[in-house]
Image: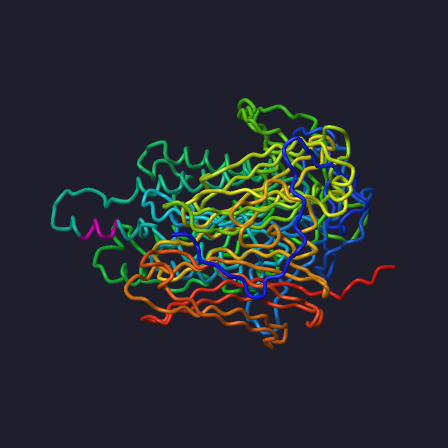
Amino acid sequence: MGRHFRFAGLIVLLAGTALGAGQAPAGQAPAGQAAAGPQSPTFKVQVDYVEVDVLVTDARGNYVRDLKKEDFQVFEDGKPQTVTDFALVDIPIERAERPLFAKQPVEPDVRTNERPFDGRIYVMVLDQAHTLPQNTNLVRRAAQKFIDEKLGANDLMAVVSARGTAGGEEYGQEFTNNRRLLRAAVQKFSGTAPRAATLNKLQDFINSSSRPGAGAPQDMDRQEREFNARAVLEELTAVADWFGSVRGRKKTILFFSEGISYDIHDVFANGGNNAASMIQSRMQDFIRSATKANVSLYAIDPRGLQALSDGNIELSGVTGANAAGLNEQGLQNENRLARESLQTFAEETGGFAVVNTNGFATAYDRIVEENSAYYVLAYYPPNPKRDGKFHKIDVRLMRPGLTVRARRGYANPTGKAPVPAKSELSAELRDALQSPLPTSGLAMKVFAAPFKGVAPNASVLLGVELRGRDLSTAANSGVELAVFAVDAKGKMKASSRESLSLNLKPETRTRVEQTGIRLLSRLNVPSGSYQLRVAAHDLAGGALGSVLYDLEVPDFEKPPLVLSGLVLTSAASSLAPTAKPDADLRQVLPGPPAATRSFAQNDQIAFFTDVYDNDLSAVHTLDITTTLTADEGRVVFKNAEERSTADLAGKRGGFGYGSTLTLKDYAPGLYVLKIEARSRLGNNATASREVQITITPTEIPR
């Protein structure tokens, strides 16, 4: 069944010029740069150079920010090295803008790279395999505390689950600064670690007490413990290896774990097999990868200050357990090994371990500080061979009275260098799509709006707006655009590639240079959470840009009431030329959907959404309400309409709903535009969409 739509007070907006086949976007060189963010070392040749993050504090523990390259000396294996690149990274802590009336910021429906990324970058690794089930909530609370209190609006974080043989739910979250998505990933965490080996042996001791000659008590979970240790270390190594593509800034793993309690130091104590040496080798692999990629690990034991445990009580209540060597000392030894593993990972990679303490707030403050103000020194290694050898790094200061913290060294990789997979995409575009950081050389805005499609897929409208002054004006210029849709498990579910090779008429070229160019396309994906990775490459001028976009596609079939995405346009934004206009929305919007969310008072906006009603139990009425709420919470505009499911003739379908607003009567400031649908049937099901917009003063032509 098609949508039923009508506009309230529909106005005629200026339609954007559509670019047909055979035309190419063109522009001019950037007239200026975005606001400066933290500096990043750059190299003309991409080789295995060495980056070192250096923290410098004075006698009071304050971070020192006025040092020059000449103040540092770097030694590798005792020999001085020439520092070829140097930068002070001083990252501000930013809070997301939100309306005064709202408890939480309104999640943006547009993402842009117009401002270079200037935040911190974290990977939160949650160790399911080494967390006891009863401590699940401790991990969730500790992890959420960092997200809620310490993650800045300019930061990026990913969540990774480290699972062992017990499995557990596979989950994760791609890099985002959306706290709601990060909290949702943390809430899926569940500890699966087996209980302590000492307690397992105690149980075996009790079971075998009636069997003469039963032998020494055994740990029935020994093999699981071995597998868990290897699996988690391999996961950490994979994260460190992947982090290697990020240059010029501190890269941090937040490792929430109770630690690896497997004794790797005494092979005979572990049954004489080679498991200890294998686990030790995996530890070395991780430290090698982390130090080579300049990754710091901060280990956080969520249990906090440890006192008398249930295990100690269990041991004390069994006669003969102490004589069999099953005593409190055995549990203490397991805890010591686990604690030492966390401390080793942290110390060898330049981080620190938060163990046996309840001072999470203080530790989190220190983590943020160490990731906010530091120096990056880079040099070409004297021995870049892939021989696996460890090289010691020593950073010294010419200025006395200061304390220096830097990683101890790095190990060269082993084996042959990986060969890039073949791809139809250019190497530049492929690297941008794989990077966890947005690239800002070619400025772009991205929006996405899911609509009901052909089941089981939804049809997602994707809009990309490229800034005109970043595009080349050379003859036969063109733009390569690629999009990957990655689901919550990191699997690519859809992709698209566009290649625009166009020749513009002089008047269209001028418009592109002034307003940019808009590209619209559709992706078909089932309901679920996705990250859209969007990258564009100016083939003539070389400018490159990428954006990460968090997208949630609702189930349009099951809920009684659900809304599509909300699309907006305006008279001013419609002036930008549009390549490949969207056929469906041309029927319901007076101009092409746009990414603009800041409008002058003399502008007019139009918006559209589909309201899907899936409740066929009886004919009923829907109330659809539009409100515009000012920053202080005052509703400055309200429009209410009624729709009847009788229009759908007993079939599931959508009510197309659109309206317009003339902005001249509203003062400049922050506003929230909200569309809400409410059913009058049964439990009064509701669905809503909201977008934050800004109204600016009208510019007076000079």
Is residue 162 found inside the magenta-colored segment of the image? no
| Residue 554 coordinates in the image, percent (x, y) | 42, 54
| Residue 330 coordinates in the image, percent (x, y) | 34, 52
Structure colour scheme: rainbow
Residue at 62% over, 34% down:
429
Whether residue 337 is visible here, answered yes or no, is: no
Left or right of 53? Residue 223 is left
The foreground one among 329 and 663 is: 663
The foreground one among 612 and 363 is: 612
181 w.r.t. 269: above or below: below
Quarter of the figure with residue 380: top right
Left or right of 557? Residue 372 is right
| Residue 351 coordinates in the image, percent (x, y) | 58, 49
Whether residue 126 is visible here, answered yes or no, is: yes
Q: Quadrant of the C terminus?
A: bottom right
Q: Which residues are magenta?
A: 201-206
Quarter of the figure with residue 497: top right
| Residue 496 coordinates in the image, percent (x, y) | 53, 36
Residue at 38% over, 69% down:
621
**Prevailing SS of the magenta stretch:** helix
The foreground one among 587 and 594 is: 587
